[in-house]
Image: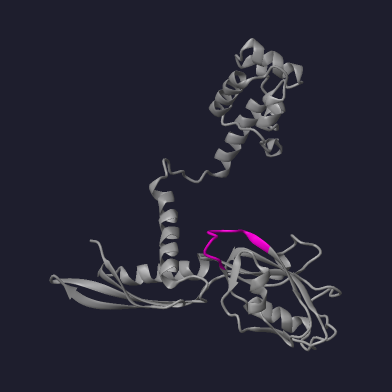
Amino acid sequence: MTFKILVLKTTNNLGIFKIYPINNGNGITIGNTLRRILLSSIYGYSVSYFKIKGVLHEFSTIKGIIEDVPEIVLNLKKIRFKLKKNYLDIEKEKIKIKIKNKKNKIYAGDIEQYSKYFEIINKKLVICNKDESVNFNIKLIVDKGIGYLPSEKKKEYKKFIPIDSIYTPIKNVSFKVINYSYNNMNKEILNLNIITDGTISPIKSLIESSKILINIFNNFINQKQYYKKKDNETIKKIYKKIKKILNTKLEKENFSVRTINCLNSSKIYKWNDLVILKESDILKIKNFGQKSLKELIKKMEKRNLKFEMDIKKYN
């Protein structure tokens, strides 16, 4: 049975939905699943690194700035970034901010003019207070992520100071299940409330979470074969078999004369000489063309071999 989704209220950051009729007993399952996905799996953007001239670590103070660096960091974490309408998706942006004197308050909204991709939702958030004679120069790296990522797990930019990132754009999700009668059958209504930070609409977040669930369950639907867990003895037998294949000479595998001659010319005599290479390495061999490559791949697939194998574990 197809159910209806009524939008009872929607704003930039609040969505109230009524979903019905749901089969008896499924309301809690659907509500709880959507809630978990919404809170854990929706992408967002956050400041990930920063750099201020003369600041070597996040416990410093800055001349002419009232707040110390830890306070500035706390405020940077709160900035909510939303992609501008012209851009569907980006991974990251390095933003260079140069605010000359005059201003004594630096707001999150001041960052927007320096960004190519983002608009700031909470423009009135105060980043810091400063003396009017002092310039405020800072570099930010804003990137895309899911959930929460602590600073100690970030090592990409060595000259920048990493900070904890709160990526999730979903602030709260709640639901309530109501029983009712529909065509003389017991059915349920799911009332779902979604609160976002304004960087994504509640309707879009509901659609995105549903797509994530579809992709997850498609793995079960499209699975061509289900595998049983192999015990240690079975794994040992498989490894032993592959080890034997890896030590087999290629000249015993009924390759064409051209293919064998090309491989031998590059000192590739056994499977273990071959599988550690990349496909592009093979094509660099003199006179080794696409026809020989197809022949090679066909025989590799037959033996459950592939390029760039880690053969150490089979020894």
Q: Position of residue 129 (x, y in %)?
A: 74, 87
Identify whether 95 is placed above or below 106.
above
Which of these two is toward me, 245 or 107?
107
Which of these two is toward me, 245 or 302?
302
Indicate whether residue 87 is drawn in magenta: yes
Q: Quadrant of the N terminus?
A: bottom left
Residue drawn where x is 78% and y is 79% of the image:
100
Indicate whether residue 114 is drawn in magenta: no
Majority secondary structure of the magenta segment?
loop
Which of these two is toward me, 278 or 96?
96
Q: Quadrant of the C terminus?
A: top right
Colour pattern of the rendering: one colour
Say left or right for 302 vs 156: left
Q: Residue furthest front?
A: 102
Identify whether 139 is placed above or below 216.
below
Residue drawn where x is 56% and y is 31% of the image:
304
Tally the numbered discs: 0
Question: Magenta segment, which residues?
Answer: 83-93
Q: Position of residue 60 (x, y in %)?
A: 83, 80
Say left or right for 272 vs 31: right
Q: Residue furthest top?
A: 257
Query: Residue 127 is drawn in which quadrant?
Result: bottom right
Query: Residue 65 is drawn in which quadrant?
Result: bottom right
Q: Position of residue 311 (x, y in %)?
A: 69, 35
Q: Position of residue 121 (x, y in %)?
A: 56, 76
Residue drawn where x is 78% and y is 67% of the image:
160
